[in-house]
């Protein structure tokens, strides 16, 4: 092997090592910069008297899916008993013939029996009680789709409690024919979601973030079908905010 050929091989190896080190250094710098930036923003939030638990810095995964909310609930509703109902668009609005008393401390236990009864609630086995979304005057059950809860009205049952803690009826939306549109997609971390809300001025000074959760919300509606993506939600002083993990959008319910 002649000297020039050896020299050329060493030159190629040297350039390859330089490229590798350059790429590695830049990735490391970006990661450290993002981490430092997030920590600085969290410090600013605490200075503005915004209280919150330390958010996780790990990413989650979720799906984009499409579903239909036009016909399945109407067809299943024909078997309902002990109530009168009507449809407001695609939403079923029901009124029980006899009100249901909900004792304090037994909200979930009482309403689980109703939701699990197919003659009282259609597709009830697709829903679960949501403590985060429920209040003193409204109890919310969320539909579970693609391994996650639906935090929009398109996949929920809502029971209204009157001043005597009696349920007169409920409203319901149901997503059927669920189709996953692509493979699992990574979402942003809790920390990034929280700092984005702050940077978009969606968290006011003195606010308190009570909880956060990863759930599906409606992204768009096309030809009667609902397309949803997994987003994180947090509760700011009983005001529900959700963020789009890919676009960074902050939306309200």
Image (tube, grey):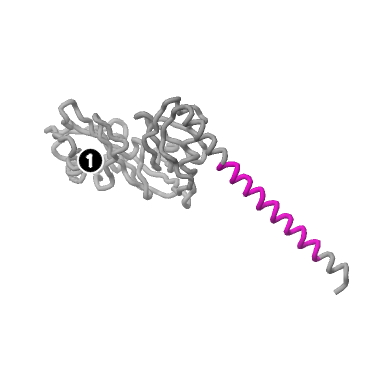
Q: Is residue 110 left or right of residue 206?
A: left
Query: Quick one: 253 or 134, which is closer to the camera?
Result: 134
Query: Quick one: 64 or 108, which is closer to the camera?
Result: 108
Q: Dominant secondary structure of the magenta stretch?
A: helix
Above or below: residue 222 compared with residue 48? below
Residue drawn where x is 73% and y is 59% of the image: 16
Query: How many numbered badges does the structure rendering display?
Result: 1
**SS category of the residue bearing label 1:** helix
State the image quarter where residue 1 is shown.
bottom right
Residue 104 percent coordinates (x, y): 17, 35
Q: Is residue 152 left or right of residue 183?
A: left
Above or below: residue 44 compared with residue 115? above
User: Hey, which residue is sitting farthest bottom in the picture?
Assistant: 1
Residue 119 percent coordinates (x, y): 17, 43
Query: Quick one: 45 or 176, which is closer to the camera?
Result: 45
**Mark 1 lies on residue:** 77
Quadrant where the image shows the C terminus = top left
The residue range painted magenta reads: 9-35
Within 10 Å of disc 1 (Cα), the crowding (few <14, some 14-19, many 20+) is: some
Above or below: residue 189 compared with residue 138? below
State the image quarter where residue 211 is shown.
top left
Residue 166 lies in the magenta stretch = no
Residue drawn where x is 46% and y is 41% of the image: 190
Residue 8 percent coordinates (x, y): 83, 64
Q: Is residue 110 left or right of residue 129?
A: left
Query: Quick one: 224 or 36, which is closer to the camera?
Result: 36
């Amino acid at each position: 092997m002649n000297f020039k050929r050896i020299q050329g091989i060493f030159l190629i190896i040297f350039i390859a090592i330089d490229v590798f080190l350059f790429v590695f250094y830049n990735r490391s710098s970006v990661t450290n910069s993002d981490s430092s930036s997030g920590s600085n923003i969290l410090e600013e939030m605490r200075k503005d008297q915004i209280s919150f638990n330390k958010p996780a810095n790990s990413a989650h995964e979720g799906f984009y899916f499409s579903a239909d909310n036009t016909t399945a609930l109407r067809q299943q509703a024909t078997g309902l008993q002990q109530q009168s109902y009507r449809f407001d668009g695609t939403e079923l609005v029901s009124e029980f013939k006899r009100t249901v008393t909900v004792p304090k401390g037994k909200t979930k236990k009482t309403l689980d029996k109703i939701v699990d009864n197919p003659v009282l609630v259609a597709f009830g086995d697709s829903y679960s009680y949501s403590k985060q979304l429920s209040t003193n005057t409204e109890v919310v059950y969320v539909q579970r789709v693609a391994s996650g809860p639906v935090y929009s009205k398109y996949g929920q049952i809502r029971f209204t409690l009157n001043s005597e803690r009696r349920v007169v009826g409920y409203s319901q939306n149901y997503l059927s024919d669920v189709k996953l549109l692509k493979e699992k997609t990574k979402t942003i971390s809790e920390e990034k979601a929280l700092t984005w809300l702050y940077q978009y001025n969606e968290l006011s000074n003195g606010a308190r973030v009570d909880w956060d959760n990863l759930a599906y919300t409606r992204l768009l509606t096309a030809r009667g079908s609902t397309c949803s993506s997994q987003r994180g939600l947090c509760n700011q002083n009983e005001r529900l905010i959700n963020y789009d993990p890919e676009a960074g959008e902050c939306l309200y319910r």
